[in-house]
């Protein structure tokens, strides 16, 4: 079938298998170009099919020759309907890993569930014995709690007061004012349950109880802080409360790992285009301006560049991992450089529909968005028939 992007609002309903494969290959080549990483050799990535999780799996496998297990929740293809992009990413990753003789197996299902945790435990016991590194990179709007059976939904809302600011429809390029009402009821609690640190802690507890964490094992979860321009709706909003909980959880996990000389960190990463961030008001406009400035300075990074720098310059240097006053690894340092943020703030003040193509990088934003779904890559013939029925080899 000929596969083209089909949009519904901020969601792309199709994904291109060859484009996703090219995306994975590009990331692998980048990691190889940067030289070996003296990192972990047995790695579990929870949330392994897109974004920072996929980049972490690629960096571990093709930078450190690591055996990797990836857990994700993706939609397989059916006749005439494409899979979700993460499915095709995972298929491409396993294909490339097999070419180089690297162990790579995947588990598809709800990572919040006890069943998927048990499947993962059984696979580690059977194939790897233990793991040295656990990456936690889940991003989900809902969580069915495995203990209570309650379905919790997260919201992205300010706390305490209405928020009004500019945003951009990245499809049309129209800059407009948007107002977001504050959260109410159980919004904060639900968001913390979905996106906080409880599930991360449950994963580590389960692995530790089954003696699957090697001596000196490390676990890392990903977070975001961002600019003062976005803090009302992000870091000081409901999602920020969840991130606070995630970051606090790192300390309790670290304490629990003392008996195996283990460690736990939260890495605060850079703003990037994701399907989730594209639906957050204000964020697309902020990223468009940020990209323009960082690209001009030569400091712009995508997921794979961020994770390569995290691994090479923070986690696996042979020295103590550098952290901020709250114990967090800061790989968002180039984004939050004072000069960069000052320039973004100045441009923000007069951004309009008419001048955004000049003062911002809306085209770069759009390209990154379509890349998420396998569209817009050089070397892929999008006019040719593509086979949507691609298998992830380790998933039967």
Image (spheres, rainbow, N blue to C red):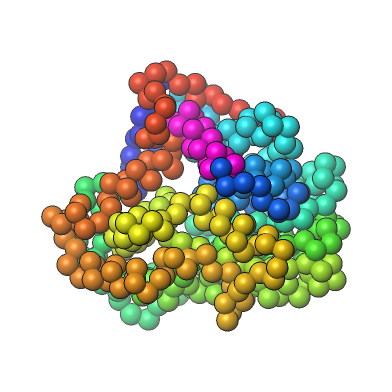
Image quadrant occupied by the N terminus: top left
Range covered by the magenta-colored residues = 16-32
Camera-nearest residue between 117 and 229: 229
| Number of numbered tags placed on the structure image | 0
Camera-nearest residue between 320 and 128: 320
Residue 72 in sight here: no
Residue 342 in sight here: yes
Quarter of the image holding residue 175? Answer: bottom left
The residue at 68%/60% (across/down) is 316
- In the rendered image, the vertical position of residue 384 relative to residue 240, given as above or below: above
- In the rendered image, the vertical position of residue 76 relative to residue 187, given as above or below: above
Position of residue 67 measured from the top left corner of the image (x, y, whole percent): 74, 43
Predominant secondary structure, magenta span: helix
Residue 19 is a magenta residue: yes
- In the rendered image, the vertical position of residue 394 relative to residue 339, given as above or below: above
Quarter of the image holding residue 385? Answer: top left
The residue at 61%/36% (across/down) is 93
Position of residue 165 measured from the top left corner of the image (x, y, whole percent): 25, 70
Image quadrant occupied by the C terminus: top right
Left or right: where does residue 119 sit relative to residue 49? right
Left or right: where does residue 146 sit relative to residue 23? right
The residue at 76%/75% (across/down) is 255
Residue 394 is a magenta residue: no
The residue at 41%/70% (across/down) is 336
Camera-nearest residue between 102 and 36: 36
Position of residue 370 measured from the top left corner of the image (x, y, whole percent): 37, 41
């Amino acid at each position: 079938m000929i596969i083209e992007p089909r949009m519904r609002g901020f969601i792309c309903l199709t994904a291109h298998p060859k484009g996703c494969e090219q995306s994975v290959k590009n990331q692998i080549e980048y990691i190889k170009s940067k030289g070996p990483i003296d990192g972990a050799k047995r790695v579990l990535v929870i949330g392994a099919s897109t974004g920072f999780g996929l980049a972490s799996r690629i960096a571990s496998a093709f930078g450190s020759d690591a055996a990797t297990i990836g857990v994700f929740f993706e939609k397989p293809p059916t006749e005439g309907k494409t899979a979700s992009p993460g499915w095709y990413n995972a298929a491409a990753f396993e294909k490339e890993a097999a070419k180089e003789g690297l162990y790579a197996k995947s588990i598809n299902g709800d990572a919040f569930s006890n069943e998927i945790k048990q499947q993962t435990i059984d696979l580690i016991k059977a194939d790897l014995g233990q793991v040295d590194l656990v990456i936690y990179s889940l991003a989900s709007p809902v969580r069915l709690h495995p203990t209570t059976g309650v379905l919790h939904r997260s919201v992205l809302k300010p706390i305490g007061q209405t928020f009004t600011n500019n945003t951009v429809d990245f499809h049309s390029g129209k800059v407009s004012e948007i107002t977001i009402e504050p959260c109410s009821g159980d919004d904060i609690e639900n968001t913390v349950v979905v996106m906080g640190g409880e599930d991360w802690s449950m994963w580590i507890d389960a692995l530790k109880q089954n003696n699957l964490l090697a001596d000196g094992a490390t676990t890392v979860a990903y977070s975001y802080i961002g600019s003062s321009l976005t803090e009302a709706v992000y870091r000081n909003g409901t999602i920020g409360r969840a991130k606070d909980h995630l970051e606090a959880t790192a300390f309790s996990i670290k304490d629990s790992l003392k008996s195996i000389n283990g460690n736990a960190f939260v890495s605060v990463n850079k703003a990037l285009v994701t399907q989730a961030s594209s639906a957050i008001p204000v964020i697309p406009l902020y990223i468009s301006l940020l990209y323009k400035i960082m690209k001009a300075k030569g400091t712009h990074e995508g997921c794979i560049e961020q994770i390569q720098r995290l691994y090479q310059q923070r986690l696996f240097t042979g020295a103590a991992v550098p952290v901020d006053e709250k114990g967090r690894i800061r790989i968002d340092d180039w984004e939050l450089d004072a000069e960069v943020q000052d320039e973004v703030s100045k441009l923000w003040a007069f951004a309009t529909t008419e001048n955004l193509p000049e003062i911002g990088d809306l085209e770069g934003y759009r390209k990154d968005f379509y890349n998420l779904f396998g569209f817009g890559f050089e070397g892929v013939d999008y006019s040719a028939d593509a086979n949507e029925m691609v298998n992830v080899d380790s998933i039967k």
